Amino acid sequence: MSDFPTISDLVKKPGGAVKKTSNAPTTQEKFDQKMHDLDLKAKEEETAAKAAGLNLPYINMVGFPVSAESLKIIPEAEAREKKIVCFYFTPDDMRLAVLEVDEAVNEYAYQLGERHHVKPQLYIISANSLETVFKLYATLPIIKPISKDINITDEELNKFQESIANLQTLAEQFKNVSITDILTLMIAAALKTNSSDIHVEAEEKGIAVRYRIDGVLHDVADLPKEDWKRFISRIKLLAGLKINVTDKPQDGRVTLKLASSSIDVRVSTMPTTYGESVVMRILHSGSKGVTYDDLGLRGEAYERLRHEVERPNGMIITTGPTGSGKTTTMYAILRTLNKPGVKIITLEDPVEIKMEGINQSQVDASRDYTFAKGLRSILRQDPDICMVGEIRDLETAEIAIQAALTGHLMLSTIHTNSASGALPRFLSMGVKPFLLAPALNAIIGQRLVRRICESCKEEVKLDAEKMERVMKILNDLPEAEKKNVNFNDLHFYAGKGCPKCSGLGYKGRVGIYEIFTMNKEIETNILSGQVSEYTIQEIAVKNGMVTMVQDGMLKALDKLTSVDEVFEVAE
């Protein structure tokens, strides 16, 4: 017998066990795998039968090529919680795989479809298929979310605001800060001066920075031309705009994260001869809104409009040019009406003032979601009160009028120069007079005038020519208002300028209004089809309407604004 060990001796372990000499599966492992495969096959057949019973398609996800874009439609946490995955997605098609179909799954699928503007198709899958797709989430790249918010600390704001005495000192401030601090300084100065818009405009020799304060643009500073590209690139990056697109207008939005609140800034860029122009509109959406009593309405106009606002149906229209405070007036009325038990829906372009307790919707021309189509959808939501940002065409006007005639209170705006001009504007659109007359409750014409700064208010003497114009306006007042004016002792005021108003003499704005409510004489005039702006104005004045310029003069007598400001805005 040989002294060399046999093969069987080499593979024996102590105790008689046999060692595996390779990775090849054993007979037992092969058997177990076979039984596992048969079990999976049986479960897949069972799932397919269940799908057929539900009249839904079945799919086996093992080996199915699921794209990363499809998988990302549903976050992993939601997918595991709801046991639903998206395995195929294009702009026109969405396919979802689920274990079971119930009311919650159907609702979630509907919401996904609404969000992505497609109609999703449900497929039934097995637990093994679902787990197979879940494992694919681990292959997705981990992308750190990028915040487009600008985090400005109160210390940074205070550092700049404390050194801003007036607009004239701002020019020096801009020269002494780095390009990275310019945006912070811009925002700090805008908040300090209560600016509504920041204009940064490329000119031939430099970059002009201008602030719109209380409706008036003021030159603030000039920036070096060489800093322009870096500055605009930073603004575009923060607002989510395309940096490499310089020959087309772009619109974006950015949020300023302050310690106490956040402020939205709407950013608009437009190509000009010497480079892109940037306008940043500051939207104080979180601040306390204007109420009905803050508007500056007075006397009979205040009471008339309040009565019309409290009616359950009809139309209240606000007129005036862009920037005359129409939206603010509409929201002040909505705040009065926003009570438990009342459903209010708005349709705007864009939503600038956010208000709790109100459903707000924004039109989107790129998706063919217009004022007319949005208004039709609103009326299917069973509202009590609707607010439409603007009536621009016949279709929107007719739907709004029908809503007013069928039990809804409708608030909207229209672009005309005066309250009496709104009626001819409606009729020129093609609105039928017999529908317009009973639908209208009230029409408000308005402008905004600057308030005299309380800290530097002083009495001024008017020259003879100006005083003559003032006396003519006051003498034409309705008798009810005229008796409240002491014509023998008239005093007018203006602001001389101080640090609190940045040297402007004005701080804040107040509305001046003309309001007429419908009456039989105006209705008869509308139904005649021969509506003239001047005729309507005469009828309204005869019935006690105070005109905008008269309301402005009364506010000048009340020390709220100056005579020059009224003439500038209303005459």
Image (spheres, grey):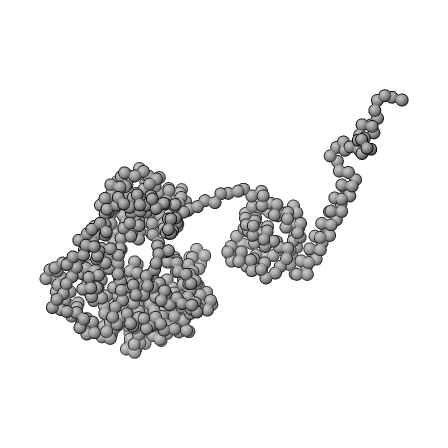
Q: Residue furthest top?
A: 3
Front residue (pair 203, 147): 147
Tell me which corner region of the image, top left, top right, bottom left or bottom right, holds residue 356.
Answer: bottom left
For the C terminus, give its image quadrant.
bottom left
Front residue (pair 492, 524): 492
Q: In this view, does 123 lie to the left or right of 19?
A: left
Q: Is residue 416 left or right of residue 63?
A: left
> In percent of the image, x 56 and y 50: which residue is there?
77
Looking at the picture, how far across and down is residue 35, in whole percent?
A: 76, 47
Q: Is residue 357 above or below residue 188?
A: below
Looking at the picture, how far across and down is residue 216, in whole percent?
A: 25, 54
> In percent of the image, x 70 and y 57: which residue is there?
49
> In percent of the image, x 17 and y 59: which residue is there?
493
Q: Is residue 403 left or right of residue 70?
A: left
Front residue (pair 77, 373): 77
Q: Which residue lies furthest to the front in this view?
A: 15
